[in-house]
Image (cartoon, rainbow, N blue to C red):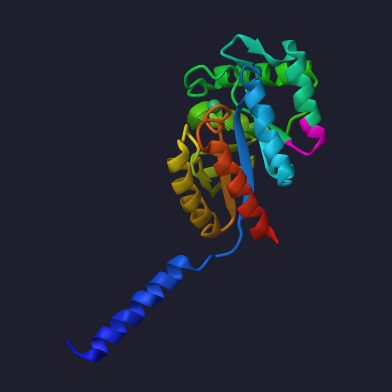
Amino acid sequence: MTGGTVSSKLFLLILVLAIILIPWGTPKLIILVHDVSPVYYPYIENITALIEEYGFQNSTILLIIPNHAGKHPISKDERFVQLIKKLEEEGYKVGIHGYDHIGNEFLCNETIAEAKLRAAREELERAGIKYDKVFVPPRYEISTQALKVLLRNNFTVFLKGKVCYPSGDCERIKEREYTWYAGRLRAKIMLVIAKFEFTHTRGIFVLSIHPKAVNYGGGMDFLREFLKYAKEKEK
Ligand SMILES: [Zn+2]
């Protein structure tokens, strides 16, 4: 092997590493808090307190389950309603996350989807909670018919790896959840991966969080460090 080929291989290696490692810029961060329901009240308080510390409430959508498991209609829980109203005043947006979140409830036909969406909206209205026309189906599962119903009603629908607009156009997004019951070590490793993925995204970067799952182990430390990092990148 000649010195020439070695140095050209080295040059190629450095070039590839540079392309991989140099950040691409700062994407638009959207935080989706899933499963916002009275069942997870204390966890939601903790998560939102942290989000506010870094000023990301305007980038956060609270995905409300209007009647979790068919047993927790939000309008019957005054404490929960007051919390959500307070958060809305602070800049959080509210979206709809199914109706009862039982199974893959939006893998259904058009008639059922219409009825579920109507019931969900009525429950939010009964509670006096304002919402944006943003919808995330439980477990990201939705039938073609149900998706049509949502889009026809002017909802923007977040799915796995994409977001679909009322016009019917869908855009690819990077959606990640790093804190599914992560222990301390796992959360630390996830933070390294998350920072890398965040700075190597063009367009929209969606950080998904589940109450209780993120509050476990190293989850909240992850969230604090990630938000701090995203804040610095914004500058
Ligand atoms: Zn969910």
The part of the chain drawn in magenta is: 87-92
Magenta run includes residue 148: no
Q: Is residue 145 left or right of residue 36?
A: left
Q: Position of residue 80 (x, y in %)?
A: 73, 19
Q: Is residue 161 left or right of residue 8?
A: right
Q: Residue at x 49, y 29 (%)?
A: 139
Q: Does residue 134 show up?
A: yes
Question: Which residue appears farthest toward the right when viewing the image?
Answer: 89
Q: Position of residue 214 (x, y in %)?
A: 55, 33
Residue 32 figure quarter: top right
Q: Is residue 23 left or right of residue 74?
A: left
Q: Is residue 3 left or right of residue 79?
A: left
Q: Residue at x 55, y 20 (%)?
A: 101
Q: Position of residue 97 (x, y in %)?
A: 60, 27
Question: Which residue appears farthest toward the left when viewing the image?
Answer: 1
Measured along the vertical axis of the image, is residue 142 above or below residue 193?
Answer: above
Residue 212 figure quarter: top right
Q: Position of residue 128 (x, y in %)?
A: 80, 20
Residue 130 figure quarter: top right
